[in-house]
Image: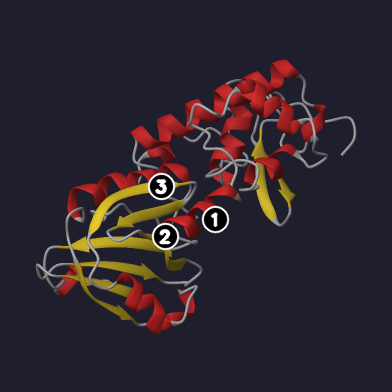
Amino acid sequence: MPELPEAETIVRGLRRSVVGRRIRRVEVMHPDVLRAPLRAFARAARSRTVEDVGRRGKNVLLFLSEDGVLAVNLGMTGRLLPFTGVPRGNERPTHPVVRFLFDDGGMLVFEDQRRFGTVEVLDTAGWAARDARMGPEPLGPAFTADVLARALGGSRSPVRSWLLDQRRIAGIGNIYAVEALHRAGIHPLRRSRELDAGEARRLHGAIRSVLRAAIRHGGTTIRDYRNVDGGEGEYRSLLRVYGREGEPCPRCGTPVARAVLSNRSAYFCPACQPAPERI
């Protein structure tokens, strides 16, 4: 599932290709990804110009003229593909869900093989209400080590689960949660409130460093993720523990282990990330 670095990479690519273009028509092939009735969605997007592109958590945001925000959650397999004209041959999307056709003859295609993503148009007040329900941006100035320590202190959840809760911190998924925990030397099953101030500071720094590194490398492609040019993210080769069960820990050489937490795999080094006394 695309996380913050993947969404940020897509946003930077879209800024080069869709800003300033006016949506002439909307074609919806699979309305189950919409969070509003089809006609209302098409009417809300039509005849508006893309003024900017941004990101909030894992969501890609197209800021439209006339107080509109086109919000796309990529789900597990969603992709946003801009074209200067009608795509032909090998460049034609194989699982198109929504097409935004521009006045200049180009288009932006949201394709999503598994259709777990969502697309909607909100006004700025509607988006502000949605925004308020999400936690702080981990790369933003409001997300400090002290803020993280206080938030962790109020939760009994395993710290890996806490990091995945978008109400607590926006944009982190399983890949970067387990990578940050390894960098910080914290076992993924530790209860959040049991982390001391020093561990919270280490985790804060690890979160920010791993996210920044992943953005520099265009995100991580495990299976489906591609950027707007169709390229893969290059951070996979730099992952320390995610998906590397049985391989040596890059820090100490101990084989990487895997635990299942909430039906999802959490990878860790048993030596560098000591298990809690109680789980």
Of all residues, the one furthest to the top in this rendering is 198
Disc nearest the viewer among 3 and 1: 1
Q: What residue type is labelled 3?
A: Arg
Kindly identify the amino acid type of the residue bearing the numbered disc 1: Arg
Which quadrant does the C terminus fall into? top right
Mark 2: secondary structure: strand
Residue 226 relative to residue 198: left or right: left
* Quadrant of the image occupied by residue 153: top right
Q: Which residue is drawn at 82% across and 28% down?
A: 194
Query: Closer to the observer: label 2 or label 1?
Result: 1
Image marks 2 and 1: residues in contact by CB distance under 8 Å: yes
Type of amino acid at the residue the image marks with label 2: Ala
Residue at the image position 31 percent from the left and 50 percent from the top: 53
In the rendered image of this protein, does residue 179 appear above or below residue 97? above
Q: Nearer the viewer, residue 204 or 121?
A: 121
Query: What colour scheme governs how the chains and residues are painted in the rendered image of this protein?
Result: secondary structure
Marker disc for residue 55: 3
Q: Quadrant of residue 205?
A: top right
Crowding at dot 1, Cα within 10 Å, few <14 / some 14-19 / many 20+, comes out as few
Position of residue 226 measured from the top left corner of the image (x, y, whole percent): 34, 54
Mark identifier at residue 130: 1
Whether residue 2 is situated above or below residue 38 in the rendered picture: above
